[in-house]
Amino acid sequence: MTTLLPQPPSTIASATAGTNPAAAAKSATRALHKGQHTRAVILDAALGLASHVGLEGLSIGALAEVTQMSKSGVFAHFGSREELQIAVIREYHTRFEEEVFFPAVKQPRGLERLCALFENWVRRVSVELDSGCIYISGAVEFDDRPGPVRDALASMVCTWHAALSRAISLAIETGELRADTDPTQMLFEVHGLILALHHDARFLRLPGALDRARTGFMRTLSYYRVRAEQPASTSAPPPVARAVAAPPQRPRKPQR
């Protein structure tokens, strides 16, 4: 009599590959690698699609068409549109870290690392001019829509902001930024430069936006940076300084 009860994994593997355990293990490994490769291909296509149409534009059907797969094949790897969107956010964050964060943390703590983080961020934005930033476009799409997708997106952005804030704090500890520097305020100003860059370069297509962002960052640094004390001078001040320091004397009235 044929049983309809589910068989344990070992029984299924043996039935698939005969009675050879090594062959069964090899077959299972191949299937696992193939599944991982297929998922990676789907995720890469999904990220490219989301960069152009946004996270809301993602759908199992659209992705199946792009990858030339069946809807059931795509669905088997993600299960739902929401899971697909979250997977895309995580993949974007992984690539963002690889391009922006990890190269910068190789630099010494302090301003060198902070400047590297900003410069890598600017370069990332410059590459995304023809596609789009998932962090920025996702914030517009989900700013007022609570749920798992918004939570995942906010979590990734907060992780990146925490890394920047930490870099600012380290620059304070190294004595390169003023002790009264507020990392949250400085982070706000730096992030504002990136948002302005994305707006002017991607939306308005204004030339010179990258240079203006870098100039804005240097001005922000100059405000928070510790200034070297000027050495005391015993010589007389120059004429212009004397004119500013000493107000002109009123002419005396002639005596009668």
Image (tube, rainbow, N blue to C red):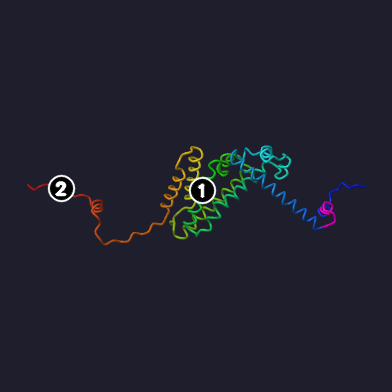
Answer with left or right where residue 80 lies relative to residue 112.
right
Q: From this view, report whether residue 169 is shown above or below residue 143.
A: below
Image quarter for residue 18? bottom right
Task: Using the image as rendered, state which of residue 133 and residue 32 is in the foreground.
Answer: 32
Q: Residue at x 43, y 50 (%)?
A: 218
- Percent coordinates x, y for residue 239 in the rendering: 23, 53
Task: Using the image as rendered, state which of residue 97 and residue 44 is in the foreground.
Answer: 44
Mark 2, residue position = 251
Mark 2 vs mark 1: which is more N-terminal?
1
Q: Residue at x 62, y 37 (%)?
A: 57
What number of labels is visible?
2
- Percent coordinates x, y for residue 129 in the rendering: 53, 42
Q: Residue at x 49, y 41 (%)?
A: 201
Q: Which residues are magenta?
A: 13-20
- Determine if the magenta segment contains residue 227: no
Mark 1, residue position = 123
- Percent coordinates x, y for residue 169 in the rendering: 49, 56
